[in-house]
Image (spheres, coloured by chain):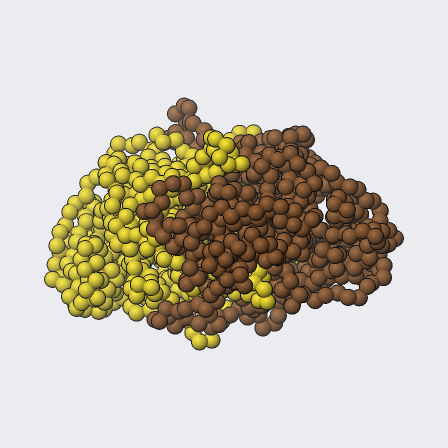
Chain colours: A yellow, B brown
């Protein structure tokens, strides 16, 4: 659950006060995110246009140029003429949601559309903070706190998206506010003040509903802190005693936001909503003497986190961390030599505050060469008379990392590029659990559905899921691709032609329509390959990239349940859609209070043709989290992920 | 497929020529493998007993003391009186298989049993090498080579287990011999001389069946070599430029074969059959001030690798790499700073030659602290007014690694101990494919079942599986444990009690009998926990360890197919059995030509009670391998594995 107190950010975010002119000459790549001066320019243009009204900026980002124009820019080898530079602004003006396209070279608003469908834009930090402050001037809350014998100055409140549960009303932007108790700990999430929930209407910034439903003990502070690690007395372990060193410096280069490392070339950037976006990843083929495309654009499209607690203060906790809070906006400053190893380089990012002012997010992405003592390939050959061959190639890869702290939870997202041509994505889940205060101090007392694990006295760790949906616009050696299912099928040997009775073989099936590519992973033996049907290797194999999934986890909510309707894109682990510039966000562009009418699941109902088209692969990985006492008071990282691995893309092992 | 030419080993294996006395005082731990002098002693005692006969030693290892005596030794805090020190010898004498127990302190044979059931012991290197040499003095073979216009001095032959396909005959130890062509490459496996298969009876060491069935082109040497890596011209990557350094040295200690690192303590050793054996792993609980047991003994029990090619020269290739060849015997000398990082320490191992002479396997296991720039846990807290908290704990773990080269394939096995209490096991598959020579140079020519991928001209990479079955004798905080399935079940909300329509909750089921614990992994949402039902945490949770599987792969062969009858233990990914000292090898003690009557699947048919017993968890991970051109001529490592993760074992996160 994203909970913010962004006032504190002022301390370390560098505020931009220079109002810039309409210069947009400082960028090099058509997919570069908006620069500091471009963001300032956007603010100026929009505010000028609505000078009498209060504009709240919820999202500002690059209005990505059309794919053909980016590709022709690329194939013309970076000509001086770039595609038009535009920003997309999602703003609330006069209680309406506006989608504004700003043309930066002409300094003009190109289009301005009012959106009146379901759902609202990303919540801003400032409005969440304002909502979090309301209880402290709200007499019923003050009296609730007094009634519990708590110190008001030790209370911290946090906003939560409200979800959607079949309500018909529209234009009613709300959050729910829940409060926590410090008083001897920094781990507020382990000390919920259970029973009090406030509903705040954001446009009026007032508490419209106040519920003080029950009093349960607040879990004690003792044991919740994570600041001062204690060590086992017998331990001689020194954290600082081990280091990764690269005396000659990193062997990757960063030209603007374009990374070159070994045979890889790609563009990396930061977006308020998606976080890291990897673009135009291609790999140099030594045999062909050219770069060959792999991934046009890849990013986290949505993060769905439904909790399984039906009590009044909990049922609505069904978060969409990207669409409701901004997976990039939740990114945090990385700590050198802690979040990333000693040899890492860092990139800053720029987001916008509610008033449109850009803010700097220092060290938002790190890039480093990863060496873990693993082996890329090896062989020992003892079969040749008079020879002993031992050939080992250690594994060094390149990692692009961001950490997104959605309130209590910390997501570590790694895009790892391997010399073998693989792109491996790993998501680490750590941070703090979301717990419910409870009367229980021992399991024996629990006679009803508790919706969680008793992980400490008075502390229920609520059952929940994490689903991360990735948008993977693969362009495997070109843009027209097909999705192939290689089914591993058992064949019986009918006659006595073999001493064997069975074997398996590969039965390939090319998905013609979207519905052919809907896959719930499970026990079926299956390879999933995105191929270029227009190209073959010398021996005639389809040139492709395999999706190697890391988790076969799917949703357990009923299809007709409201959170699952909104999160319908998790129904299948794999979807394939024809490329459509507007289909980026699996949970819909306006996810806050969405009603599920603009999700990947809905788009895909059209069942469009996907064979030999420019296609997008969507992969959802999931974790069912049954909390354990080891997750208290801070969770050891649990990692999951997937790999895109070349499958007859090269003529042979590219790392020879 | 294990293929050996062990003569060359003489170059680097240190031969032991000192004949030792009956001293057995040089060991400290009852689970220490046999020492050099003990192995020599075993040879002397057995040879003395059968002085007139030719004894071939197929396996010599520690006859593990009974578990209670090891545990009482442990709980008495290592008294001077150790359990009796015994060796188990599996030998062939006068064409019979003997199981000989040698008592080392009395210098006597304690028992000597002739085994006359199905199956034979591990093949020795020497008999394989002898078989491999036979063709060079066999005129029909020489003429076959001449007929093909090949140079005999460039031919290398290799032995293969023959499997079992319903034959009734017994006492007929055999291998099949296939040959390969060098002539310009060291990668013999990419140049099979297809069509020639010889059957050798080992006891007579003669070719009893010779088949020259067809002539197909030998794939060309060009492109098969892996010795001289070429680099992309644009690359500035330096493999030596990145290092892991530990200026103060490693922070683990090795006392004999007992490792101490952070809160972990365990015993590590090398066995000819299993490879690495981890014993008595326990973790110090700072709160309780004591070591708590986790794993009594864990090792690779069997490695089943069936190929899916039904042709005459291939149908029998259904390998059991541990039982037929010795997973430990196939271990290779690790290359410092290549196979393991710069900060690794190495352990030597001792195996025996066919005549009983011990040989030293230098650097057979490495141990190192692993630091990959990952995060053990972290959190950024921005919600507390006036405070910014950024707490990050980098991940450092301890890895125990062995590489086993079963002929063409290289298996990298890592046992990784985490400070969080997890034991993570990773298996990396690399090395060289087993390919079939073929007339085809292009896919378009293939009109019949090819049983593989055309990965280069005239080179079919055969479809195959790898199943690794782990014997995991967990002793979770004591010996009596139960196996609990936590099923995540969807609950519908029947009435209007909640705006939600569904949620999931945990329905626990304790396995009473073995059959209750047979699990084929798939799409089912399930947690698998080994718990100690006699102990609870303070808040009343079962103390346990979770099995987090890494792969849900199961066999695709028919149950009634002969290889699958022998590999019946792969039918379920998970089995639980009551501890039985004799049930160690999932494919049976005598796996070569086994008939499946001594497998885990057969033992488990008794359906014994497993609740609150000393139980053993068996986990099988698998990979279906559809070869790709990138696997040619050497395979990039493909990794899979599993994790044993504490589940309410501790009162809280142990790394605080």
Q: Position of residue A88 (x, y in %)?
A: 21, 54
Looking at the image, which is closer to me, A454 or B135?
A: B135
Q: Position of residue B524 (x, y in %)?
A: 48, 35
In the image, taking residue A400 as reference, residue B565 lies left or right, namely right
Q: Residue at x 62, y 64 (%)?
A: B8
Looking at the image, which is closer to me, A579 or A350?
A: A579
Q: Quadrant of residue B610?
A: top right
In the image, taking residue B447 as reference, residue B242 lies left or right, namely right
Q: Residue furthest top?
A: B495
Q: Is residue B277 visible?
A: no
Q: Position of residue B579 (x, y in %)?
A: 70, 39
Q: Residue at x 41, y 44 (%)?
A: B450
Q: Quadrant of the C terminus of chain A?
A: bottom left
Up the image or down, B87 lies above or below B239; here it is above
Q: Residue at x 71, y 55 (%)?
A: B354
Up the image or down, B7 lies above or below B97; here it is below
How many marks the image carries: the answer is 0
Q: Residue furthest right?
A: B106
Q: Quadrant of residue B232?
A: bottom left
In the image, taking residue A239 as reference, residue A177 lies left or right, namely left
Q: Is residue B593 visible?
A: yes
Q: Residue at x 58, y 51 (%)?
A: B177
């Amino acid at each position: 659950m994203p909970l913010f107190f962004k006032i504190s950010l002022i301390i370390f975010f560098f505020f931009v006060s220079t109002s810039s002119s309409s210069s947009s000459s400082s960028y090099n790549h058509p997919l570069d995110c908006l620069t500091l001066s471009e963001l300032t320019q956007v603010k100026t243009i929009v505010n000028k246009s609505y000078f009498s009204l209060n504009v709240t900026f919820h999202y500002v980002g690059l209005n990505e140029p059309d794919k053909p124009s980016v590709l022709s820019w690329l194939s013309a080898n970076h000509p001086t003429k770039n595609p038009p530079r535009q920003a997309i602004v999602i703003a609330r003006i006069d209680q309406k949601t506006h989608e504004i396209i700003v043309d930066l070279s002409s300094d003009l608003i190109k289009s301005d559309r009012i959106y009146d469908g379901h759902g609202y834009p990303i919540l801003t930090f400032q409005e969440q903070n304002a909502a979090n402050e309301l209880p402290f001037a709200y007499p019923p809350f003050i009296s609730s706190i007094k009634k519990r014998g708590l110190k008001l100055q030790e209370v911290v409140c946090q906003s939560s998206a409200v979800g959607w549960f079949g309500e018909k009303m529209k234009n009613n932007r709300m959050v729910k506010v829940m409060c926590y108790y410090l008083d001897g700990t920094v781990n507020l999430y382990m000390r919920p003040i259970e029973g009090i929930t406030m509903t705040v209407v954001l446009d009026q910034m007032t508490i419209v509903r106040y519920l003080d439903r029950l009093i349960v003990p607040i879990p004690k502070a003792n044991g919740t802190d994570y600041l001062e690690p204690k060590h086992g007395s017998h331990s001689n372990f020194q954290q600082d005693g081990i280091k990764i060193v690269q005396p000659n410096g990193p062997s990757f280069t960063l030209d603007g936001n374009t990374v070159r490392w070994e045979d890889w070339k790609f563009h990396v950037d930061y977006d308020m909503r998606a976080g890291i976006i990897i673009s135009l990843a291609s790999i140099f083929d030594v045999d062909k003497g050219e770069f060959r495309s792999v991934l046009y654009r890849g990013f986290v499209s949505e993060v769905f986190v439904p909790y399984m607690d039906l009590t009044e203060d909990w049922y609505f906790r069904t978060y969409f961390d990207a669409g409701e809070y901004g997976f990039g906006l939740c990114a945090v400053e990385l700590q050198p030599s802690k979040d990333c190893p000693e040899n890492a380089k860092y990139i800053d990012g720029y987001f916008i505050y509610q008033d449109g002012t850009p803010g700097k997010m220092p060290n938002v992405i790190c890039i480093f060469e990863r060496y873990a003592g693993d082996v890329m390939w090896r062989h020992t050959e003892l079969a040749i008379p008079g020879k002993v061959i031992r050939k080992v190639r250690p594994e060094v890869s390149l990692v692009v990392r961001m950490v997104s702290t959605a309130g209590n939870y910390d997501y570590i997202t790694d895009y790892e590029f391997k010399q073998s041509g693989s792109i491996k994505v790993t998501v680490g889940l750590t941070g703090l659990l979301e717990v419910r205060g409870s009367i229980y101090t021992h399991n024996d007392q629990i006679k009803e559905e508790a919706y969680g694990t008793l992980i400490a006295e008075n502390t229920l760790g609520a059952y929940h899921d994490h689903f991360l949906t990735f948008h993977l616009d693969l362009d495997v050696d070109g843009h027209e691709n097909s999705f192939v299912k290689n089914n591993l099928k058992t064949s019986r040997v009918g006659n006595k032609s073999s001493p064997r009775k069975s074997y398996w073989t590969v039965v390939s099936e090319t998905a013609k329509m979207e519905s052919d590519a809907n896959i719930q992973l499970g026990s079926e033996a299956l390879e999933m390959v995105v191929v270029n049907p227009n190209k073959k290797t010398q021996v005639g194999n389809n040139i492709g990239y395999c999706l190697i999934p890391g988790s076969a986890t799917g949703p357990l909510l009923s299809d007709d349940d409201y959170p699952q309707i909104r999160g319908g894109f998790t129904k299948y682990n794999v979807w394939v859609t024809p490329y459509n510039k507007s289909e980026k966000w699996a949970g819909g562009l306006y996810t806050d209070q969405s009603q599920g009418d603009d999700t990947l699941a809905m788009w895909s109902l059209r069942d469009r043709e996907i064979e030999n088209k420019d296609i997008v692969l969507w992969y959802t990985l999931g974790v069912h989290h049954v909390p354990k006492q080891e997750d208290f008071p801070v969770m050891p990282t649990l990692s999951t992920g997937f790999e895109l691995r070349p499958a007859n893309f090269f003529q042979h092992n590219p790392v020879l």
